[in-house]
């Protein structure tokens, strides 16, 4: 089992210099708001993904008045020990090391130490725009398929080049279309590969989402989740050719896997229009736990599970169902945070969950 045994922080957010040791499988991090609970989990995310979970520039993670930071993690994976270090230098250069060996391309590290993070703002995965759900899909696939990550990087680069060229064509209508032909062919190849991977992935993930939602809710509430893609009906090459004239006018690419989405419904109605706060958060947890289960199934080793402030907007029954799976049936290491020590002691104690408490 993958486990984080020690975490050392220097100049990171509100931590000038501090080390933490973790011996248990479930760790409850407690303390008032502003004491660094979320920062602690985000440091763990840095060691798994080489970046913050909260999409901020690295410089924003430096302690106030500081000029850089250092995060070190000591991991255990079976009989093997692994040391990861993330350093932001004073000049703004970020370095990442595994067992003191520099990682020259950060994307190569993704999936080596997998993690699943659940934070309050993740409710945008259910309530927000389609790009939130695409990012979720890509996060899962990139941790289990290195080829998918590189294909996605290539697709994004070509898409940016195509959009830039569309702006040139819009400003200069007499320009030849030969470069656009090349970009369309390249985008079609990479986009088709991504669509195939996502479609195969969804066939596995979506039934797991429904199972986890029923587990958390305790009943079948009529949830349905589907995968939407323009490529289901028409190959990408055809979509790009058909939409070329309007793409030039609008100066953007309107067709492709960057328009994919999940169709969320409850009892046949759009989920966002009918779901309660508890149902929305239940679906968020169901999506994230399905991510966790898929990584476990593919890799055979459970990822780190990081749960930030999960005790809001779920009734007692749903929370009990969630924690029973997360902390008892799930085989991996779990970190969860809460502002109320008494509440976390009561909830975990009532569920009969063994844990260690860390006060910050």
Image (cartoon, rainbow, N blue to C red):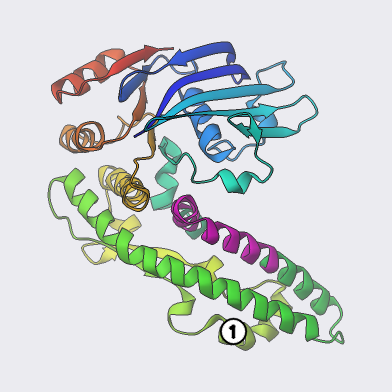
Question: Is residue 138 placed above or below 102 in the rendered structure?
Answer: below
Give the residue drawn at x 27%, y 65%.
269
| Label 1 neighbour load within 10 Å: few <14, some 14-19, many 20+ | some
Magenta-highlighted stretch: main secondary structure? helix
Q: Residue at x 62, y 59 (%)?
A: 153
Compared to 28, does 279 lie above or below?
below
Q: Disc count in the image?
A: 1
Q: Is residue 265 visible?
A: no
Q: Position of residue 198 (x, y in %)?
A: 43, 66
Instruction: Give the secondary structure at mark 1.
Output: helix
For the point 60% across and 28% down, the residue is 85
Q: Residue 142 at x, y = what percent?
A: 50, 53
> Is residue 267 toward the left or the right of residue 128 in the image?
left
Closer to us: 179 or 258? 179
Q: Residue furthest front?
A: 79
Residue tagged 1: 237
* The N terminus, quarter of image: top left
Q: Residue at x 32, y 59 (%)?
A: 205
**Can you tell which quarter of the image residue 277 is in?**
top left
Question: Is residue 25 on the magenta stretch?
Answer: no
Residue closer to the observer: 349 or 45: 45
**Magenta region, residue range:** 134-158
Left or right position of 121 against 255: left
- Image quadrant in which the C terminus is located: top left
Q: Is residue 102 above or below residue 352?
A: below
Q: Is residue 230 visible?
A: yes
Q: x%, y% of residue 219?
A: 12, 50
């Amino acid at each position: 089992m993958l486990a984080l045994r020690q975490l050392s922080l220097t100049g990171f957010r509100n931590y000038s210099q501090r080390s933490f040791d973790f011996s248990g499988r479930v760790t409850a991090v407690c303390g008032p708001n502003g004491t660094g609970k979320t920062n602690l989990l985000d440091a763990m995310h840095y060691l798994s993904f080489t970046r913050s979970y909260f999409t901020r520039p690295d410089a924003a993670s430096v302690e106030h008045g500081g000029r850089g930071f250092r995060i070190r993690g000591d991991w255990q994976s079976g009989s093997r020990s692994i040391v990861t270090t993330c350093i932001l230098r004073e000049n703004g250069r970020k370095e990442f090391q595994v067992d003191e060996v520099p990682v020259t391309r950060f994307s190569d590290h993704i999936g080596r130490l997998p993690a699943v993070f659940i934070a309050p703002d993740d409710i945008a995965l259910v309530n927000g725009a389609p790009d939130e759900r695409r990012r979720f899909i890509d996060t899962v696939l990139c941790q289990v398929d290195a080829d998918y990550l590189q294909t996605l990087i290539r697709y994004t680069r070509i898409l940016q080049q195509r959009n830039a060229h569309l702006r040139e064509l819009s400003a200069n209508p007499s320009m030849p279309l030969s470069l656009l032909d090349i970009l369309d062919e390249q985008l079609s190849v990479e986009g088709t590969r991504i669509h195939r991977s996502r479609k195969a992935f969804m066939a596995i993930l979506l039934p797991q989402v429904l199972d986890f939602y029923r587990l958390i809710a305790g009943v079948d509430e009529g949830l349905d989740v589907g995968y939407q893609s323009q490529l289901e009906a028409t190959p990408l090459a055809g979509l790009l050719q058909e939409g070329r004239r309007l793409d030039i006018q609008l100066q953007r690419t309107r067709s492709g896997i960057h328009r994919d989405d999940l169709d969320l419904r409850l009892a046949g109605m759009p989920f966002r229009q009918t779901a309660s706060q508890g149902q929305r958060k239940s679906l968020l947890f169901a999506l994230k736990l399905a991510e966790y289960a898929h990584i476990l199934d593919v890799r055979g080793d459970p990822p780190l599970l990081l749960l930030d402030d999960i005790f809001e907007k779920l009734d007692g029954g749903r929370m009990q169902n969630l924690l029973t799976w997360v902390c008892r049936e799930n085989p991996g290491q779990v970190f969860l945070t809460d502002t109320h020590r008494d509440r976390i002691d009561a909830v975990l104690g009532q569920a009969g969950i063994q844990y260690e408490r860390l006060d910050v």
